[in-house]
Amino acid sequence: MNSKLPFLCAASLLGCVSAFAQQTAPVTDDRLAALKALKIDDATITLVEHEASPARTVVKLVLRPAKGSNINVEVALPDAEKWNGRFVGLGNGGAAGKINSGSLAGQSAAGYAAVTTDMGTAPNSDSGIDNHEVWKDFGFRATHLMTVVGKQIVRTYYGKAPEFSYFSGGSTGGQQALQEAQRYPEDYDGITAAVPAHCRTPLHAYFLWNDQILKKCPFSKEQEANVIAAANEYMASREIPLSAGKFVSDPRCTAKDIEAVIALARKKDPTLTDEHAAALHKLFDGPRHAVTGERIFNGIPLGATFGPARGNLYLFRWVFGPNKPLEEINFGADIDIYTAALAPYLNAENPNLTAFEKRGGKLIATTGSADSVVPCHATIDYYERVIEHFGSLEKVQSFFRLYLVPGMAHGGGPGVNQSPSVLEAVRTWREQGTAPGTLTGRHVANGKTEWELPLQPYPLKTGWDATTSAFKPVEGPRGGVERVAERFRPPAAE
């Protein structure tokens, strides 16, 4: 394993880009006309336009692969002399429903032919109410189809296919990323999945669980802050000096740890009542089936904020309609109905990545220890299930690496809040054979880097050598999270 990732061998990549660009003709009216005349099955091209700054051509189209489906796709093509010969698919976020043109502009300015989709949920998340085609589009179909048509547009525009194709997404985009690796392994050569919402229906059950608890027993900002401070204090003995008492770099814990954190929080804050203590037990433990007691999802990570861990309840409207009160949805029969309806389309839980591995695909996932929106537990367990499937950690690390990022939340956070360019890391791995080892995370405030922290591929973690006053990689624990019951992550369906 390499001890340090060389973030791109700039000279060799730029040379490759230059050579590729010289073989490609510049923008002409004929090329734009070819795009406008392009016929794509079940698609309507609505815009072909060349922009001067940045120099690129934008193509917009609508895909309707089935009645009830309406998928918006946008492609950004840098001028030929600026194209690096690579294609990148970009993920969306939340319930999607719109296209982030800014992300396209950034990647096309960097030389990539880029594509993204609204995942078929425009004009808003209610488009999925009792519409099974939207469920499929949001779950997996829109991302695959945008990839197929995006590559077709690239071939038409540049006269050749991309040399390499990559996918980059976070949160919902991370769900898209893992769906691509699992369902369509031929689509991409390299994939990045940041804070991936791959265990989708259990995750939203977690949102509902937290929402119902916090509506019945709200916490003031001061009370929440004191609970977080108690978790940081209790877990400090397991931390390196940089993080001790400031954030939790690894929230995996036992029931005994949860009891101790709650007791310490009540000691620090006498306004926390018995009702608050009972609520904290449920929040930290996470949702279980009301009848069988089976694990549906894990709880809020110790040291993470509560507020972001609720809401996002549109999936329940998709299944139960807009009129059923959310507080009446139970964790017995209702969760069974919800799971049966959506999980086969939305969840990306298949550990069999054999086809992706055999074609040389490379995958990097990151997950944050302080993320209460998409907690790290399910991603750690998914990685462990991939290891079980392939038989060894070493085999999996030859094509798939996971980084647990200390103190990173779902954007920002008390710890690492700026990660390295994982897209460039996976590109280096795929094209140059240099596997990622230690990456560098940063905590940035007011535009300045306050400190840096080496990030180790799981199960390694960053330790501290008191003798040399330096960071060092140390062996971390494997697993350590209760597995979501298999019936809440059923096999995928088309």
Image (cartoon, grey):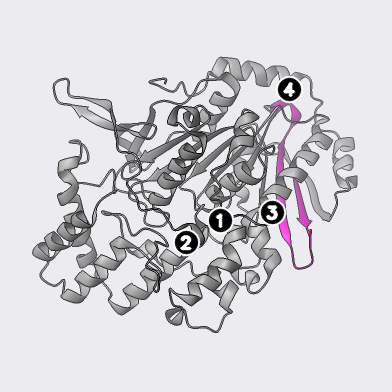
Which residue corresponds to mark 2? Answer: 202
Disc 3 from disc 4: Cα separation: 30 Å
Question: Label 4's element?
Answer: helix
- Reply above or below: 149 against 488: above
Residues at marks 4 and 2 touching, judged by CB atoms closer than 8 Å: no
Drawn side of residue 379 relative to residue 248, left or right: right
Closer to the observer: label 3 or label 2?
2
Label 3: which secondary element:
helix
Instruction: Please give the residue where the numbered disc 1 appears in the rendered image.
Output: 347
Query: Circles 1 and 2: CB distance less than 8 Å?
Result: yes
Q: Earlier in the sequence, mark 1 or mark 3?
A: 3
Q: Quadrant of the C terminus?
A: bottom right
Label 2 SS: helix
Whether residue 120 is visible to the viewer of this picture, yes or no, is no
Disc 3 or disc 4, which is closer to the eye? Answer: 3
Query: In the rendered structure, which disc, 4 or 2, sits on the residue that comes first in sequence?
Result: 4
Which numbered disc flags the more N-terminal residue, 4 or 1?
4
Mark 4 belongs to which amino acid? Ala
Give residue 21's mark.
4
Q: Position of residue 37 (x, y in %)?
A: 90, 46
Q: Please report the residue visible at 68 percent of the width from the left and 68 percent of the height from the top.
A: 132
Q: Nearer the viewer, residue 473 or 109?
A: 473
Q: How many C-alpha atoms fall within 10 Å of the one at disc 2: few (<14), some, or many (≥20)?
A: many
